[in-house]
Image: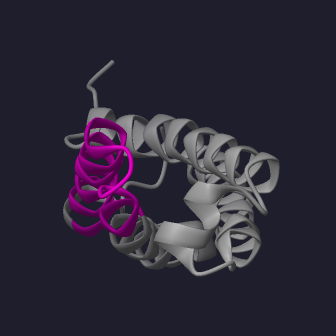
Amino acid sequence: MAETRGTGWVTYAGIMMIVVGMISIVDAIWAFRYNDTLADLVFFENNIQTWGVIWLIVGVVLIAAGFGVFSAQPWARVTGIVAASVAVLSNLSWAQIQPQQGLIGALLASLVIYGLAVHGDVEAI
């Protein structure tokens, strides 16, 4: 049985979207926990809960699109590219507080964009 070229990248993109989505949800939980603390006041001007909601939405969208990629849904490719682009921006904004986590999250999301943009038209995984 011949393997379709790019299948590994699509599988990687689906897995990474789910993983990065979970990381974003962890970020949201952290933001909800540290609402009304000194970190919230100094770094986020008392709106860390808003960032928590944004990270929660990004995480849920990434997880849903990750599972959609596995079932070769056309909407999942577009949603994955858009959501991973948003994840890159949100993770880079997070890099001031957690540099390693922010940069690794941005890197993982960038690789998802590559996998879906270059090899995302693979019909079957």
Give the percent coordinates (x, y) of residue 73.
Answer: 63, 64
Q: Which is nearer the eye, 75 or 106?
A: 106
Q: Is residue 76 visible?
A: yes
Q: Residue at x 40, y 59 (%)?
A: 94
Q: Is residue 76 above or below residue 46?
A: above
Q: Position of residue 69 (x, y in %)?
A: 56, 53
Where does the N terminus fall, quadrant-wise? Answer: top left
Q: Which quadrant of the view contains residue 85? A: bottom left
Task: Based on the picture, tell me whether residue 2 belongs to the magenta stretch.
Answer: no
Q: Nearer the viewer, residue 34 or 59?
A: 34
Res 18 → quadrant: top right
Residue 37 x %, y %: 71, 56
Identity of the residue drawn at 71% across and 64% down? 52
Q: Nearer the viewer, residue 3 or 95?
A: 95
Towards the viewer: 50 or 66: 50
**Viewer can see residue 73:** no
In the picture provided, is 50 more to the left or to the right than 17?
Answer: right
Q: Quadrant of residue 89?
A: bottom left
Task: Decide whether residue 111 is among the magenta residues.
Answer: yes
- Give x and y (percent) for residue 11: 42, 36
Left or right: residue 17 versus residue 12 is right
Majority SS type along the magenta span: helix
Instruction: Please name the residue shown 36% across and 39% down the image.
Output: 101
The magenta-colored residue range is 91-117
Above or below residue 120? Residue 4 is: above
- The residue under the point 22% across, 48% down is 107
